[in-house]
Image (spheres, rainbow, N blue to C red):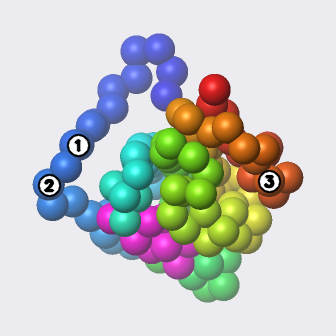
Amino acid sequence: CTLGSEVALRVGGDFFFDPQPGDSPVKLVLIAGGVGINPLFSILLHIADLHGYQEGKGNGYKMGTVKLYYSAKQTSELLFKKNILGLMNAFPGKILCRFHVTQQSAQICKELQPHVTGK
């Protein structure tokens, strides 16, 4: 987003991401905290499928980039973190994630360090 951009924001409730082949590409920002990652991780997997399908077939819905911002108290509480890192590696520049930890006292593992901010 840039200054003045219009965004849609949805908090809680039933939501999904199911674009159709003729829909315009969108850039998504997903924000999760703690176990709130569950529905967003499903959306992230669907996005990865869309990117994979697009690369393999060249038709269908053309997915834009997705940025996931995911917060927890400690890195040990970041659910699906290895899967998320795998998706970022599989689709560089298309699937991005920033983890935020609020009460981390232990050293953060090297694999996560470039993607973690916090205290």
When asked about the image quadrant of residue 56, the answer is bottom right
The residue to which callout 3 is attached is 109
The spot of residue 2 in percent (x, y) is 51, 21
The residue indicated by pointer 1 is 10
Q: Is residue 101 left or right of residue 113?
A: left
Give the amino acid at mark 1: Arg
Seen in the image, is 116 located left or right of residue 1?
A: right
- Give the crowd class for mark 3: few <14, some 14-19, many >=20 residues within 10 Å: few
Membership of 47 in magenta stretch: yes
Of the residues shown, which amino acid type is indicated by label 3? Cys
> Disc 2 to disc 3, how far (Cα)?
34 Å
Say which label, 1 or 3, has the lower sequence index.
1
| 101 is within the stretch colored magenta | no
- The 10 Å Cα crowd at callout 2, few under 14, some 14 to 19, many 20 or more, is few
Depicted 74 relative to depicted 37: above or below: above
Q: Which residues are magenta?
A: 39-51
Q: Residue at x 37, y 58 (%)?
A: 35
Residue underneath mark 2: 13
